[in-house]
Image: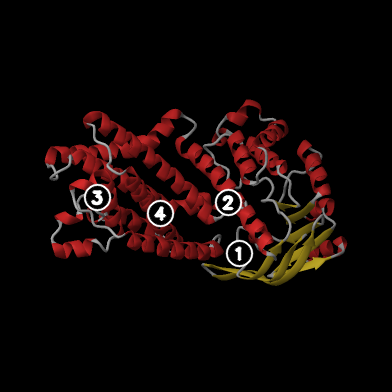
Amino acid sequence: MSFRDEAALILRGARMQRRVIGALIIREMHTRFGRHYLGYAWLFFEPMLLGTCIGLVHLLRDSPSAFGPFEFYAVGYVMYFIFRGILNRASSAIPMNISLLYHRTITLPDIFFARHIIETASVTGVMLLLFFVLYVINGDFPENPSKVALAMIGMALLSQGLALLSAAATAAVEGIERGVHAITYLVLPICGMFFLVEWLPDWLQELALYVPMVHLFELLRDGQFGSRFRAVYDLSYVAAWILVSHLLGLAALRITRQRLGLE
Amino acid sequence: MSLELIDVHKSYPTRFGRKVVLQGAFGRIARGEKLGILGRNGSGKSTLVRMLGGVEAPSSGQIRRSMTISWPIGMMAGFQGQLSGADNARFIARVYGRNTEKITDFVADFSELGDYLRMPLMSYSSGMRSRLALAVSLAVDFDCYLVDEALAVGDTRFGRAFAAKIERSGLILVSHSPSMVRRLCTRAAVLDHGTLTFYDDLDEALATYNAL
């Protein structure tokens, strides 16, 4: 096969995959929210409501030094919602969609990609709304929106890698999904949503930076109010997590696919 | 263009030991051929259908496809209960890169579901469901149609449309009913105790099957 043939083949495959993922997104949207506008509103409402609650609780409780607790915690929680939304739904993705595989152009990763795009897009919408509200209320706007965007993309990709792994694990060993649900909550105190690295004692800073999400929250806050604190993050560390989790996750899904259907 | 089985083995664990469906099957189905696969209940027909359809992988060996094969006709593969019949049809059209309007028009015309096409699938009666599923299956063109078990293909509207469709392309019919195989197929294979034997002569296949 010549280079041109090969390139044409890859291009055709990419086009087909885009088509399939597009079809899956529409199907998933209709299924999850019905064909009602209220349904679509819920997509935004859930993270918005939770993010606002968390923000308000902290508004009443304390005030982390230089920035308003509401914009610190509410925005943080909304980003955490990407992780929660993607990972919590991962275990049901295969059992709920197994009959889709009769259409051989649909692959297991396609099913995950479609869901994750919906999840990320909805949280992005909430984030934009939140920033708009904050701007109207107190004139605050992120100092560097592209850093905020990068943090969200990083969070989506990291969650995706972990979701692929957890879905494969759930398919192999029944019951693991309960553990995954627990992990999404256990991760809350250590993921960086509630703190800045510079608030921690030195020995704890070093430990915290082993958690990939801490770097993403630092990046998020750097984008929000970077001039008011010293952000600590290493994006190459996050990239390594994303890469490794994707490689392992996709490989594990391949094995899962081979074993599917055995009852 | 064909479907080829190359030393296909398949077994899966059950509570009472391993169930063997195939042990070293070879065979080739060319485009346009009408093949019947006969097997008694419990011989592993459904597993074989899932393997031919590409949902389940063989334990070892290879299934090589160089033609497009449908999902089992009439099966609601990937249909969602909360979605309307039309939404489900559009989804299938998108997945196969077909024009969504053309497909829904065909489905509306063929299924005769009328306004129900815009109602959620879960509100359908079983008759309506099967009409929708058959209509969608026929709306997309394939080189070979895969049929699992008894399908009401008598002298009905669907039966005639189906017959015309497979006349132009091919058919793999997996069934326990010799009469259906005789009516629709030109070649047959028998699945028994892990062995899949192909016969070029239909009568020979049916005789072997009846003697099982």
Mark 1 residue element: loop
Q: Nearer the viewer, residue A65 or B85?
A: A65
Chain letter, disc 1 residue: B
- Label 1 vs label 2: CA separation? 21 Å
Disc 3 vs disc 1: which is toward the camera? 3
Does residue B60 appear in the picture of this structure? yes
Q: Residues within 10 Å of mark 3 (few under 14, many from 20)?
A: many
Q: Provide residue A13's location: percent of width, then percent of height.
A: 62, 54
Does residue A81 appear in the picture of this structure? no
Left or right of A99, for residue B147? right
Q: Which mark is residue A193?
A: 3
State the residue position of label 4.
A157
In the rendered structure, which amino acid carries the disc numbered 3?
Met
Left or right of A205, for residue A130? right
User: Could you tell me if the residues under marks 1 and 2 are in contact, i.e. CB atoms within 8 Å?
Assistant: no
Disc 1 vs disc 4: which is toward the camera? 4
The single residue placed furthest to the front in the displayed view is A227
Chain letter, disc 4 residue: A
Q: Please give the name of the residue rendered at 66% of the width and 51% of the height, measured from the top-left corner.
A: B71
Q: Please give the name of the residue rendered at 75% of the width and 54% of the height, measured from the top-left corner.
A: B173
Q: Residues within 10 Å of mark 1 (few under 14, many from 20)?
A: many
Mark 2 residue element: helix
Q: Please give the name of the residue rendered at 46% of the width and 39% of the height, measured from the top-left corner.
A: A32
State the residue position of label 1.
B57
